[in-house]
Image: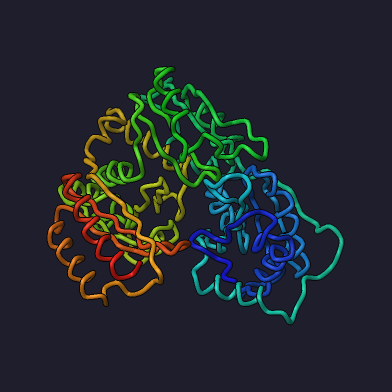
Amino acid sequence: MKLFGTDGIRGRAGAAPLDRETVSRVGAALVRARDGGNGPMRVLVGRDTRESGTWIEEELARGLTGEGAEVVSAGILPTPAVAYLTPGGGFDAGIVISASHNPFEDNGIKVFSRSGEKLAEPVEARIESVVHDGSWQVKAGATPAVTCRDLSAAYLDHARRILGDAGPLQGSRLVLDCANGATALMAPAFFRSLGFEVEAIGVAPDGRNINLHCGSTHLAAARERVVSTGARLGIAFDGDGDRALFVDHRGHVVDGDAVLLIAGEQLMREGRLPGDALVATVMSNIGLEIALRERGIGMARCPVGDKYVMEEMRRRGLALGGEQSGHIIFAEHLMTGDGIGTALEVLRIMAATGRELADLASALVTYPQVLVNVRVRERADYMRVPAIADAVRRVEASVDGQGRLLIRYSGTEPLLRIMIEGRHDEEIKAWAEEIAGVVRAHLA
């Protein structure tokens, strides 16, 4: 069984690979697969508010301490806080127990290296190999010794360097939707300390209501509250706090593509955008690419997943990257998505420019997008089928420069996904159906 996906190990809590035995083996394997280092391995663990987080932490600690590791539990803490505190506290690894925006029944294990970055795939593969090696067992023993420490203040002090106070935005009303997740215990008080008036929702976690009709994947509540309270803007985090989406004062959603454009233009203006370029994923709208090009900013695309964004930023020496879903990486701050950090950057840009979020976001003209899924018999190389290849090339020639065609297989279902963006809705629908029809005729 492959354990690691695009964002760590994830699944239904209590079922493989998140059953107790496998979780404890993952903990032990992290130590056994350790590359270098002197003395006992020191590991920092944080989690979101899911009810399963407690026992998963205990099983991880059982495996870790059984191999001689020292474990520090920071309790409920956002993913970016663990990423920051791991190198800052001299830990050899950081672990986050979370399934991000998924419902409470799911959970996951994300691992950060001693540098505070998500593990590279070769390291993940080495850990998987150790887990599946049947020649060893997790050492039996009593409840593992775990040191509990509240480390949230150190992370928030770091975040405060982005925006020390509200400045010209002093007293502005913000709606914060904390998704009943990891930011619920810290974000409202933190933003109030900066000088904002905060209307907080999604701040009553009970172990089962994380992401339930709230947070960055359910924006209706935030939109309604922004409009009804006359707030300047709304900020919605996901369950583990590594992403943020926004709502302007009119109740309109401002997504990660808009944030990348807003931040990219401002960082270039400030001389803080190396290479005058940024990284986005294959899911970012062609409108972002065109708007950036008009402003002299290049855009490199990478696969979906903020760890791939980070790797591409590293490879190209760039300072900004992110996803439409709200994972934004500011390299000067952290090399992982950070919802609170992203919110502070947006507020900083509003203060610096004197412009409202709606005005800043209006620079992005989103192109119509259509997505057609075709169920297939097998995941064949569709470009080896002449009729499909011909249809794809015709559409690519039609959208060149003013649109985009993306075809990929689903990672979990026997589906071929055909996504097209362009200027005219009816036109791109016709193109998508042209390709889908040929695929159905040959692969369905």
Compare residues 399 and 29 and report the one nearer the observer.
399
Seen in the image, is 348 located left or right of residue 430? right
Residue drawn at (77%, 70%), measured in percent from left and top? 138
Report the residue that reaches farthest toward the front. 441
Q: Position of residue 338 (x, y in %)?
A: 47, 46
Is residue 62 visible in the rendered image? The answer is: yes
Report the residue that reaches farthest toward the top. 229
Residue drawn at (71%, 68%), measured in percent from left and top? 25
Q: Quadrant of residue 399?
A: bottom left
The quadrant in which the N terminus is found is bottom right
Seen in the image, is 354 located left or right of residue 240? left
How is the structure coloured here?
rainbow
The quadrant in which the C terminus is found is bottom left
Q: Quadrant of residue 433?
A: bottom left
Q: How many marks?
A: 0
Q: Quadrant of residue 62?
A: bottom right
Compare residues 10 and 299 and report the one nearer the observer.
10
Report the residue that reaches farthest toward the bottom. 135
Residue drawn at (67%, 40%), measured in percent from left and top? 207
Compare residues 25 and 265 and report the one nearer the observer.
25
Up the image or down, 286 lies above or below 374; here it is: above
Up the image or down, 391 lies above or below 11; here it is: below
Is residue 313 visible in the rendered image? The answer is: no
Residue drawn at (29%, 30%), measured in percent from left and top? 358
Seen in the image, is 184 located left or right of residue 300? right
Q: Position of residue 58 (x, y in %)?
A: 75, 55
Q: Position of residue 302 (x, y in %)?
A: 34, 62
Q: Position of residue 140 (x, y in %)?
A: 84, 68
Up the image or down, 74 lies above or below 347; here it is: below
